[in-house]
Image (tube, rainbow, N blue to C red):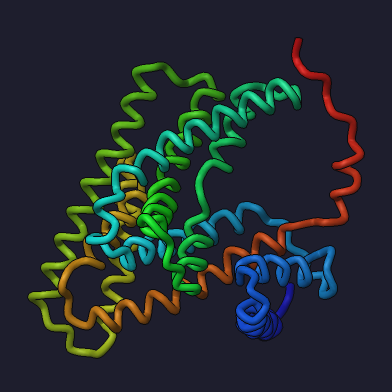
Amino acid sequence: MVPISITLLIAAIVIFSCILGNKLSSRLGIPALFVFILLGMIFGSDGIFKIPFANFQIAETVCSTALIFIMFYGGFGTNWREARPVAAKSIVLSTLGVLFTALLTGIFCWYVLGMELLEGMLIGAVLGSTDAASVFSILRSKKLNLKYGTASILELESGSNDPCAYMLTVIILTMMAGNASAGSILLMTLAQIAFGLLCGAGIAAAAIWVLRNLTFKAEGLDTIFVFSVAIFAYALPSVIGGNGYLSVYIMGIILGNSNLNNQKNLSTFFDTFNGLMQMLIFFLLGLLSFPSRLPSSCCRPSPSPPS
């Protein structure tokens, strides 16, 4: 077993490398998240440092937890006055867009690759959502001024399509297990949306009341409180059958557009923490990459399409 001191030393070196990579990406004009993936590949099993890591369950847990705060800060940093005029367009893109992507991918995988239709749609559901971390990072770090409210559409769509892709993934997995009927799918979808919206709005209202009416004795306790509330906003609806990512995103929008004490400090903390979570997610994705396996995958004969 690797000593904890060695593990911490490696973690510090990785963070330093990601910070230097971020600086380099700014000069070269390439997305920092792409650099984080490359660093993960360099440190990984096929890279220079040969860090053995192939535990997908741990990676899924870590990335899912990190995504809670990325979704929260995505909502927290959204200017609702600018986003409201394009909210309808964003919702259409984040729902029908994900559905059409899953359907088209499923048809392609079924007809061209010879896969089952539901398996192909599952791949499409996973690929159908715009990566919120990438969109928020690029639009906000580059401060792009896109025409026709495109930036607001992209931000709102990228934040709201993850819950839609999550719901579609759960529905397809349920159908693949043979435990789905039209009624159960409808109830599951309504529960995901309803509990997600209600929990997000209700928890946000309670958090605003606490922040405005209670005095925190020690400096920084209000930030810790909001941190814990973000976790609670994800966990509660997830336990009762709702969509946790939708809940935490809605809560972020409401808190971010409310007049709160120390709002600037909250924004600074979650901006910094969000950057750390982005480093973690994309470095892990790079660490899980095995470029040496690509030639064998590419040379593998393709199955014949269905008749």
Residue 6's x, y, as percent? Answer: 71, 83
Depth order, front residue of 23/188: 23
* Residue with the most extreme left position: 213
* Residue with the most extreme top position: 307
Residue 216's x, y, as percent? Answer: 17, 84
Picture quadrant where residue 269 is located: bottom left
Picture quadrant where residue 204 is located: bottom left
Relative to residue 143, is residue 223 drawn left or right?
Answer: left
Q: Is residue 306 visible?
A: yes
Instruction: State which quarter of the image contains the N terminus.
Output: bottom right
Residue 183's x, y, as percent? Answer: 34, 18
Q: Residue at x 29, y 32 (%)?
A: 190
- Seen in the picture, residue 82 relative to 121 is either above or below; the reply is below
Residue 157's x, y, as percent? Answer: 40, 50
Q: Residue at x 58, y 71 (%)?
A: 279
Instruction: State which quarter of the image contains the C terminus.
Output: top right
Q: Residue at x 50, y 73 (%)?
A: 142
Depth order, front residue of 129/232: 129
* Residue with the most extreme bottom position: 218
Relative to residue 12, is residue 69 drawn left or right?
Answer: left
Q: Is residue 8 visible?
A: no
Picture quadrant where residue 241 is located: top left
- Seen in the picture, residue 273 relative to 293 is either above or below; the reply is below
Looking at the rendered structure, the number of numbered marks drawn on it comes to 0
Relative to residue 146, is residue 27 drawn left or right?
Answer: right
Q: Residue at x 49, y 27 (%)?
A: 174
